[in-house]
């Protein structure tokens, strides 16, 4: 059984890792690290963990971790992991970073995050852990840059179309809807129940740091430079994320032929489900699970395609995919510890 | 004081007309018509009206209405109003139809509604009651075809851009999000709380009957044939509708210049609010009111625009706009009976 | 037209006063006072007021208010109004305090609010503005202590039963459920959407400052000392409040006879609706309106009664009742400016 | 590995059994029985099961079940199980009935369910499967009558108090709040999103069939006849159930001493968590898990107690407890397949 530590113990990402790893046969959590709440009991912040998580949170000590830990999950805010992961170079500790610190080029990171980028040599080693697409690269990696929640859904839908030369890479529009947990645990006006409930509102239009992430990895599948228009919306629900994507078809195709292409593309991927014609993904269909559900419609009137992908932002969009990556890195069964059936209703 | 009748007394449209007309100084509701529940008390179906609406519902008698009524609001399902309105031709009764019966050409109606269209001569007289755009035509009309909820929001955002030759008419994508009340009062799996709550799901992709309605009226402002890709989503809230629209700019412009154009376009329209740069419309900002809030962002990276419009689907998207049209037809103050401040929080 | 000022301009109480007073024929708001945000535009905090409220907020200047204002609404946190209202003694300004500062005896206030009580002489002049019960006292008052939201619902149900000697005053249990807006605009963990949504949780059991308020005013209708057990719950909705009350019957009665008693008790009260046998109040049946809906059931198996009262916590439980009191104080029609039909759905 | 069949395959109870049993090491579902949808694919009704449950639903054939099945879960509407379970008498099939058919005496069943009761001889063999209370009886049972969701929460809170002679058995009031999934999958006005959202409403006051169930099993711990006043409320959330219970103390005690009593009472029960003083159970703290969280407060002002218990109505209140009972009946680890951490947020 491998020993894991979670850094960033009081955010939703860490809490979801704790929930999911409970069912994992090969990983046990032996340390929960929180700089701000070291010495405290996690159940004081999260009463639902009363009687379940009883170890005290600790402060970060890389030397101890190096000796005692096999897998390190970093569920920290932007700008933290880039200062921690380099300490583990040259050790056998596998690092899986759920933040954005290792997802972009140094230039992109500076521009979109407004922070100093990670050390270039370490950055180069990091593999973008979009598990269903970069499966082979992940298997060989020692540092995983776990994708953002929106890029996970958007790229899962877009990559097969770009890779299969089905759509024009210009004019791609991504309209994303996320539950409020996507905004994290911090208090804010927009996350106040009385503001968020019975409300839909776009935010960060044209400025979201997931834009360069989507473009960067989508561009790997074409010689063209993919540029997307990406707009996020807050939706009055806790979990779940849907990306509805619009693009122009390169040649005439039918909905059936596109679905067949998708089906084939993901034929060996247990967590991607291509829905039958006429059916579209609902976030509630994946809640609490590691599935990514995809549906598509070719609009012959406008020779364009509408493709939608739904995930649970905290599972497939964060903690679940991190575990999926850990499975791949360690040569375990891909689905180990992730066979949750969606919670419905 | 003019006497009004409402046909279709048990749907949400009628209930909202009753709520709003309570505050109207020139209109009183004297009859509520329901074929299916004639003789019953409306408060039996809608307990919130206990002690407020005490008149029994009646069955339809056009001869009586002709004599006793000045304004007829038809809040009926598709296919009903087209058989009723012709009876009032040659009378002084003003007809305002909230259904889709008079919005399309006969060919479009047959194709998208799958029903026999209205009599062509009567259809020709009907004016599309998008109050803030077709203001002058409405003033002169005797039959109003009140717009659909999605077209109201979509056209309010699109028309100024098309009319001002700001965007390409190809490649327009409309991503719409609506509260569940948009699906009406009928029982269905998708409107069941346990299905709809904590869920976002696209529906009727490429097949929504509001597509030809948007295209038809947008095309009036250009020589080109406007074709839109239009996708609707059910959102876990009761009221509210947001359209996020993506289009390519014809020439380089800034967010500021577009907002100025919009501001100017609607300078005399009391119910359209153009939000300042950096701010986007929230459905909660218009709940219970007749406002349409619009925000825009020009994405210079992709030379495209994102424009979003929020309305209350039952007010501006139905009953409120119907009253607005009644005000215009009768030469009353435009805002009469509609000066509701949004209900917040 | 009387001139009104609102102090505490950025809380939900003030925002609701602004919304409701828009429709009032005899009151106009001429000043909005906010110590913390003086000089700012209210629409910057509440975008839904864009284009509607355009006057800048001012800081408090009692001398100016005394000259320019007829009615003063205080929608301030506990501990503020008690320092402001005394300045207006000897003037003609009518003061309506929505906070708890003038609801209790000095001893009770010290104990439950943990603050210095208001000046005893001024406190004595304040009338508890439970409009449907203390109607005559309110008419003669110059200072109104507007009731808390829970006491409004609880007392509206309890007083007729105690006054009619129907129930034992011992063993009364009040189980209250409130929407999150009841917790106010401030940011807190419990009001965070991701915590509050899909959740019900009791809070402040046995310690709520509305306990002495309910007991104090219920005791006026009996020689006994009324003591209640009162438990509040946060419910995942924005507006609305329901009190379900349990008590032992003094003698055998039927549901019908109790409903008749209630009907009679409130026969001249336009805002209290007694529901027919078998029907129970839903908060959604009163949303946005000034109604208090009451239903009851006599459980002959246990010789006890279940009585439930539903209100909109921000209208009947705050701003609406404040306006009702202003109407009574000024001899206007009781329902003036409050004839809103509940917003449904 | 034991083979299980689920009868009533398309209700929420069955769906939750399927979700939970996925993680069970000793039970595999080999048959899903649905009379109304035999021959259909369950994923057609529940798209979230696409690719997960692929066996066709079958119609009921008791002879086949007898041969091929070890454990039979009946998640059927009232009135069905009583006709099925008798067929399995004399066989080794363990029957676990999630409906109300075997919970009451024949007289009570006739009165509260309005149906013919089960055969008296079979009824007598059925053990009420409140797992944490009747643990030993369950271990020896071959027929389990799985408790209703409300009785599970109510009795978990009440029994230790009655058994410990802490409270008077007269004057017990139970105020229950349930998510809409408690009303089942069927379509109804009260479960329509637009009615249920932003709403709290009591229902079935004094008439709920869980009343005799609570009284019957609470009475086993006292010589007195327990009579309760029980009121249920629909809350705008999908899952979760909270019972807030009010009772009079027999003698003076403190919150601390009661909590200690509860702690002791459940000291060996892994699924009951007694919360520390000052903390109250939130339904969100148990979502998706088999926990029952209990908090209590002794109100010394009124010498009464407020005790609240929260469960997930579909897990602890139905499918989870059914599996717990299967574990007990088969001598497996009590927590087998039920170690889910609550889904938060």
Image: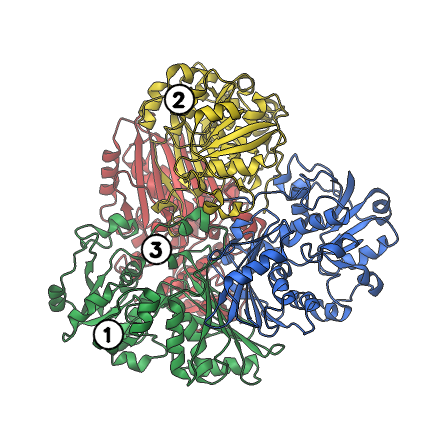
Chain colours: A yellow, B red, C green, D blue
Mark 3 or 1: in front is 1
Q: CA distance from mark 2 to mark 1?
A: 64 Å
- Would you call the spot at circle 1 few (<14 residues within 10 Å), some (14-19), or many (20 or more)? many
Q: Find residue A121 and report its horizontal and vertical position in percent.
A: 40, 14
Please tell me whether residue C285 is drawn above or below residue C138 in the rendered image: above
How far is mark 3 from mark 2, CA to CA? 40 Å
Point 39% across, 31% down: residue: A230
Percent coordinates x, y for residue B235 in the rendering:
47, 46
Q: Do pointers 3 and 1 mark residues of a single chain?
A: no
User: Residue at the spot x=40%, y=45% of the render?
Assistant: A200
Name the element at disc 2.
loop
Q: Is residue B146 left or right of residue D95?
A: left
Residue C274 horizontal/vertical position (percent): 47, 75
Residue that carries the numbered disc 2 in the rendered image = A104
Residue at the spot of label 1: C143
* Residue A258 visible at all: no
Contact flag, marks 3 and 2 (Cβ < 8 Å): no
Q: Which chain is indicated by disc 1? A: C
């Amino acid at each position: 059984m491998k020993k894991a530590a979670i850094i960033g113990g009081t955010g939703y990402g860490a809490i979801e890792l704790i929930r999911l790893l409970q069912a994992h046969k090969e990983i046990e959590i032996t340390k929960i690290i929180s700089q701000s709440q070291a010495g405290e009991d996690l159940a004081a912040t999260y009463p639902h963990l009363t009687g379940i998580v009883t170890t005290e949170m600790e402060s970060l000590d890389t030397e101890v971790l190096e000796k005692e830990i096999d897998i390190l999950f970093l569920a920290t805010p932007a700008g933290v992991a880039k200062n921690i992961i380099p300490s583990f170079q040259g050790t056998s500790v596998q690092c899986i970073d759920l933040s954005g610190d290792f997802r972009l080029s140094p230039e992109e990171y500076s521009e979109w995050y407004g922070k100093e980028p990670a050390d270039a040599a370490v950055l180069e080693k990091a593999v973008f852990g979009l598990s269903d697409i970069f499966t082979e690269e992940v298997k060989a990696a020692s540092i995983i840059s776990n994708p953002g929640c929106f890029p996970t859904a958007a790229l899962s839908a877009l990559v097969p179309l770009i890779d299969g030369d089905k759509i024009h890479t210009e004019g791609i529009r991504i309209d994303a809807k996320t539950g409020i947990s996507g905004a994290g645990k911090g208090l804010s006006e927009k996350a106040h129940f009385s503001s968020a409930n019975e409300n839909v509102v776009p935010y960060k239009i044209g400025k979201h740091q997931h834009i360069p992430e989507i473009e960067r990895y989508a561009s790997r599948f074409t010689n063209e430079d993919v540029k997307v228009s990406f707009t996020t919306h807050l939706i009055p629900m806790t979990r779940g994320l849907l990306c509805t994507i619009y693009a122009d078809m390169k040649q005439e195709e039918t909905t059936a032929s596109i679905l067949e292409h998708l089906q084939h593309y993901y034929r060996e991927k247990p967590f991607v489900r291509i829905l039958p014609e006429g059916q579209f993904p609902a976030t509630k269909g994946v809640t609490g699970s590691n599935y990514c559900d995809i549906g598509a419609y070719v609009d012959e009137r406008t020779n364009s395609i509408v493709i939608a992908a739904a995930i649970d932002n905290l599972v497939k969009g964060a903690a679940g995919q991190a575990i999926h990556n850990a499975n791949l890195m360690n040569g375990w069964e891909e689905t180990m510890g992730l066979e949750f059936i969606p919670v419905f209703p």
